[in-house]
Image (tube, rainbow, N blue to C red):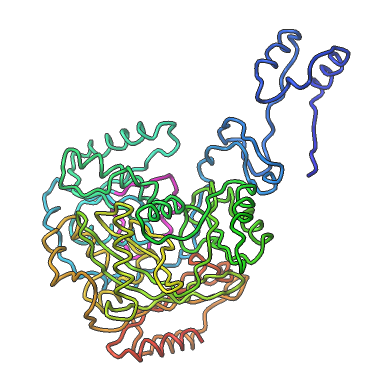
Amino acid sequence: ILLLYFVPEEVNNMSRRTHSRSFDHTKLSTGSPNSISKLALDDPDFKPLKKAWTMLSPPTYKIQAPINFHHSDVLYRRHFNASELPKGLLKKGLSLEGLQGSWLSSSSSTPAPPAAADSDSCVIVVDCFSTGAMMAHQCLENGLKTIRVDSFDNPDLASMVPSNCRSDYTYFFTFDNDSPSKEVALATLLDKINATKLRPVAVIAGAETGVELADRLSEKYNVSNPEILTNGSSDTEARRNKYLMGEKVRAAGVRAVMQQMATTWHEIKTFLDSWNPSPFNVIVKPMESAGSDDVTLCHSEEQVKAAFGNIMGKVNSLGCVNEGVLVQEYLQGTEYVIDTCSFKGTHKVIALWEYDRRPTNGAGFVLHGQRLMSANEPRAKELIEYQFKVLDSLNIKNGPGHGEVKWSNGGPCLVEVGSRCHGAEGMWMGIATEVFGYNQVDATLDAYMNKGRFLDDNVYPVSPSVRKSHGCAKYLISFQDGTLKNYSKAALDEIKAMKSFRSLELFLKPGKLIKPTIDCFTWAGCVLMANADKAGPHAGYARAAE
């Protein structure tokens, strides 16, 4: 490490004046402010030097108390004493900025929920991007007054809403994440909402980033109106932080992955030495992100070290700073998704998906596509029973759940679960409705505002055993890095002519930068397919990949 010291002339002159004086240099530490005060009394011209900022720490950061680092940790820190980033620095990846929302016309099967039919009632959706934008769109389409609340200030999120998706929200508020007191910020937000004179009947997390605020808001409103569903705030951290999530699941006696949370390389090194994985297959990923963002499979200690350095302190694809990393055992096997919805502890599986993940472009877990499963397929019963235990262990008693589970070593094991709807911008809604007659957004709105309909097993079975069709989503994978000139018209025409074709989304416009696909934020597009004949989507999926 090369350290360069630039000494102002006035300090240099002062040092010459005090050079002949005798004092204990060991007292001049950042941990002994009194020693500096004594020195200042001895020499009124003395001006203590301020702590220098590292290159990747903007001067608008707030200073925390000094942190004691092991010398090796310095190599992997992007910032040392920053409590928050300045406004405007956090950005969510905009790889889907060309999204049109071609599936919206076929997405909903639900009539307007009667619980929100009053003129003074409203629905609050926290973070209206990704599937949250679809949630708000459905509310508006059903004539419900809809309040958009952003959990943090990020104007770029507007670019993540499909162009034909409604965004004429009744009101729009932003939670003050910069407030030194979250309780004060929450009280201020509640005052703003209450000043509208509208009566909230539901508070729903639209995206992963909105889970904690939705939990706290709904908990507050539940006090005065017990009909408002809430998961409460006592376990909200475990529903967002992947390390706490895994440990809480394990504590409930449910299988969980071996793991270690770390903020320093020393912690990771100690964990690896005690574990001694053989063969060396180790996962390193952010504690709070989504979309396979920076999830890395490492085969050596050096690769773990590099992955840690890449993640720690980085602004992730959800626009949040990675304040820690998660080191886990690698679960080898097929990954499944169990999308659920719950009402006061009664769980229902709304959709089962099988993921098609493959190593691509140097990344280990790129999602190439996903297909809808029925509950009578092999492994489905065990996956459902396992996921219900996970929901109970995390106190996800109300609303949606998006669980990712791997079948490894003969059984299911949790990758992670979000107490919000399936992401991927809600593109899956249309084919889910065609295959089963409903989707997770529909079920969520009914669980919150039409409990009779939600609890009716004829409308929403406990699990999707009877299908009307077969469906899948094929994500378009980029292997190129540069500027997109155009798409192949012949290839697009062939895809659209397939009998199973339902809709096509191209995420990038000609003239935009295109990157090799390494996660969900760098897809080039998506083809949605469905057909009563199983062979149709299967053949279309393979051909679209070609």
Q: Which residues are magenta?
A: 148-169
Specify the quadrant of the image occupied by residue 536: bottom left
Is residue 30 or residue 16 the one in the foreground? Answer: 30
When the figure is inspected, residue 429 is found, relative to residue 185, above or below; the finding is below
- In the image shown, does 123 or 82 lie closer to the viewer? 82
Q: Could you tell me residue 354's position as x and y percent? A: 39, 76
**Callout count:** 0
* Residue 7, placed above or below residue 117: above
151 left or right of 22? left
Residue 12 drawn in magenta: no
Residue 158 position within the rendered picture, expressed as x and y whole percent measured from the top left:
41, 55
- Image coordinates for residue 134, horizontal then vertical, percent: 31, 62
Q: Which residue occupies the foreground of this view, 120 or 424?
A: 424
Image quadrant in which the N terminus is located: top right
Task: Return the x and y of residue 466 as percentages of the image width and height.
Answer: 21, 80
Residue at horizontal 67 percent and vertical 45 percent from the top: 73
**Rendered residue at 17%/38% (across/down):** 224
Q: Which residue corresponds to the image point at 69% horizontal and 33% vertical from the top-left? A: 52
For residue 405, side relative to residue 95 (left or right): left
Give the image quarter of residue 371.
bottom left
Residue 162 lies in the magenta-colored region: yes
Q: Is residue 276 left or right of residue 225?
A: right
